[in-house]
Image (cartoon, rainbow, N blue to C red):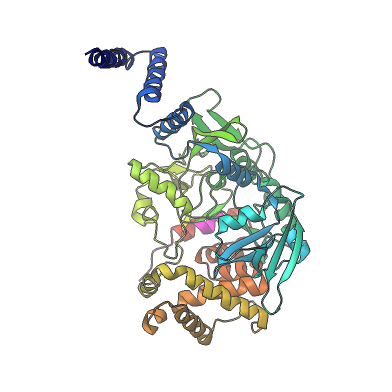
Amino acid sequence: MRQRWGVIATVSVISFLSGGWLLQRGTAVGGNVYQQARLFDDVLGHVSAYYVDSLGETDLYQKATQGMLEQLKDPYSVLLTGDDYKALTEQTSGNYAGLGIQIDVRDGWITVVAPLPETPAERAGVQTGDQIIEVDGKSTEGWKNDEAVKALRGVAGSKVTLTVRRSGIPEPLKYPLTRAQIHVRSVPAGTMFEGNVGYISLNPVSETSAGELRQEITAMKRKGMKSLVLDLRFNPGGLLDQGVEVSDLFLDSKQEIVSTRGRARGATKQFFDDARQTWPELPIVVLVNEGTASAAEIIAGALQDHDRAVVVGTPTFGKGLVQTLFPLGEGVALKLTTARWFTPSGRTIQRIVESEEEQAEQAALEASDTLLGEPDPSASDSAIRARPVFRTGSGRVVRGGGGIVPDIVIRADTLTEGEREFAKALGTNLPQYRDVLTGFALEQKATKKVTSETFTVTPEMRQQVFQRLSAKGVKLTPEEFAQGARLIDEQLGYEIARYAFGRPAEIRRRVGEDRQVQTALGLLRQAQSPKELLGLAVTARNPEPARN
């Protein structure tokens, strides 16, 4: 009996405490911030003491923090720790400690895509196409990209030995290397095309972008560049201040570049150009697409609104939310959305989405990379015409509604029905397909059968790809394979150019088959000044009606 009353007493105490908390919760839900804080502490205490599974208070606080950020329904507001924090730092600064090698997994081995200039790997003689088969004596067979990155990077000054297999050399090569601080340029070396048209890409917008871009344009001007294609396609953005500084290179003093509007003090402000532009006579075409986002959209929008450049491509991603980074301790930071961006004409860069599902889908587009490229519905003519109208400094019509709508909409080549059938038949064998292309390209490099970067992919080369796929167990009928002939020739051509002649050769080959770049080159070869270029753009967007 005494034991029974003890149990009843215990239950009564718990019920009393629970009832008291429930009563308190009823008064606190609509109460002030102090009551809400008391409520939170009470919930935390009860979960810690009575929840069926044991949870430490540290774990509970962490879950509460994550839950609070998730309830903001903003995929860009996150708590960064560990590798995520490190990755953001590397992306925005372009700096890391390692060897300076671009790598990819091919046929189960870590393959060198390219050594970066002026790095330990390049100075030691590591070459494009080398297979890294051991790191400090440990086999790399079957490694994933992230495993290789972790093994190759480390503290600056630390040592590592790579064992490399090179096509045409029977014995493996050993490279004892010392890791160093590596800077990945956001502006690689530019390319000059016929008519003294320069081509420069910028990706991403990092803390040295403006200086690197100024340096590259200056160098190409010395080589005779008279007009410029600035490629911002697939640029995910980056730092606001660098987006402003890059725009500053092309605009005049006191011209607005971008404005931010937020709730907190200091979040609403305007950013203006500080000095006169350096190259006022330089006609510029800016290339954008659905992968152009954030700070890259600031650049495109500012140059378009001030009639400084013609924008060509497809509507941009529409990420117009400002994230501020709040360091919260060693290796921990809060990335929080604090404002929205607007172009000088008043257009919001942030694309409006109707639901959480659409918002998540929009964010996921940043990381998409597939063989099949689906057209963006927002790039259709009817969707563009439905967008609100804004006007540039000279009165030209530009479209709002989120993102940057190009002056001339040129959609990238899409796959034919036959090529889609080939890709569908290939299915999950895409890695084997890529392995075959790279293996074949490495053989061409070793045997030196291809002697010029302008080579033609022959039917015999394509047949070799088919036979090697079959040898790897990829089941494709001759008819299915034949449907993808154009696509295969294109991708095999890029792969051979990369491994036999280097990344610049691959870029030149890609540009030659790129409708958007070719449109830009065509405009710039006709324009002698920025004003003439704008006139050509208006004509290209509004061609005269056909006459009978």
Image coords of residue 232 (percent x, y): 56, 53
As drawn, the residue found furthest toward the front would be: 1
Q: Quadrant of the N terminus?
A: top left
Q: Is 100 inside the magenta-drawn segment?
A: no
How far from the left and from the top, in percent, is residue 27?
A: 30, 12
Q: Is residue 351 left or right of residue 532?
A: left
Q: Which of 259 and 439 is in front in this view?
A: 439
Where residue 253 appears, x then y in whole percent? 66, 37
Main SS of the magenta part reads helix
Q: Measuring from the top left, give residue 156's x and y in whole percent.
A: 74, 48
Question: How many marks do you count on the picture?
Answer: 0
View extreme (bottom): residue? 460
Farthest left residue? 1
Q: Magenta stretch containing residue 534, yes or no?
A: yes
As rendered, which of 381 and 24 lies closer to the eye? 24
Q: Is residue 5 visible?
A: yes
Magenta stretch, residue numbers: 532-537
Question: Compared with residue 251, is residue 189 higher up or lower down, i.e. above or below?
Answer: below
Q: Nearer the viewer, residue 488 or 343?
A: 488
Compared with residue 63, is residue 501 higher up or lower down, i.e. above or below?
A: below
Q: Is residue 4 above or below residue 303?
A: above
Q: Quadrant of the C terminus?
A: bottom left
Residue ID at (46%, 74%): 487
The answer to whether residue 193 of the structure is visible from this angle is: no
Q: Give the residue drawn at x 34%, y 44%.
A: 357
* Of 178 and 334, the residue lying toward us: 178
